[in-house]
Amino acid sequence: MTEPTSSALKRRRRQLLRKMPPLDAVLRGSLIERYKRCGNPNCKCAEGPGHGPKYYLSVSYSGRSPQMDYVPQAEHAQVCEHLANYAQVREILEEISEINHELLRRREPL
């Protein structure tokens, strides 16, 4: 298997940059789905899974406890999209970094 040429690596890097989602539409964290019981013994939630689903965004920070924020149902789809965008940005940045590392290893201009 042959290694890609430096020009092919640079072309791939340009393609990756075009695939980047808008950076103002990224969100780091995890979406947690929860069901809660209201405490009323006559409510259907007393026997079932609970009221919900309710969604919470969990974000971890170094040296601190994770922060949980309620996500209103109306915002759920947008939050999911922003989380997916963040994962895509990380994936693209990782591949771009690998390309740049290979170009540097070859002593090619970045």
Image (cartoon, rainbow, N blue to C red):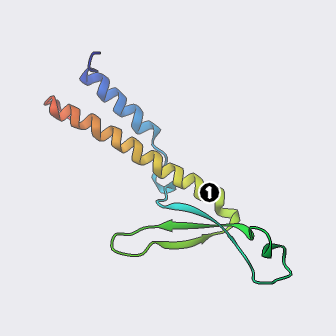
Residue 34 position in % (x across, y down): 65, 67
Q: Residue 31: which quarter of the image?
A: bottom right
In the picture shown, does residue 85 fall above or below 70? above
**Residue carrying label 1:** 78
Q: Is 80 on the left or on the right of 36, as rendered? A: left
Crowding at label 1, few (<14), some or many (≥20) Cα neighbours within 10 Å?
few
Give the camera-side residue of 37 and 7.
Answer: 37
Q: Residue 80, position in %: x, y?
A: 59, 55
Residue 45 position by quadrant: bottom right
Left/right of residue 54 with respect to residue 2 in the rendered view:
right
**For residue 60, side relative to residue 78 (left or right):** left
For this orientation, the residue located farthest to the left is: 107
Q: Residue furthest toward the top?
A: 1
* Position of residue 60 measured from the top left corner of the image (x, y, whole percent): 42, 67
The residue furthest bottom is: 40
Q: Is residue 38 left or right of residue 43?
A: left
The residue drawn where x is 73% and y is 67% is: 52
Residue at 27% across, 23% down: 7
The amino acid type of the residue labelled 1 equals: Gln
Image quarter of the N terminus? top left
Residue drawn 34% across the image and 38% down it = 95
Up/down of 100 relative to 4, above or below: below
Q: Position of residue 40 (x, y in %)?
A: 80, 84
Depth check: 24 or 95 in front? 95
Frontmost residue, 81 versus 2: 2
Give the residue drawn at x 22%, y 37%. 101
**Above or below, 100 relative to 2:** below
Q: Where on the picture, by quarter, is residue 82?
A: bottom right
| Residue at the limit of the structure toward the right, as seen here | 42
Secondary structure category for the residue under label 1: helix
- Rendered-image quadrant of the C terminus: top left
Using the image as rendered, state which of residue 45 and residue 32 is in the foreground: 45
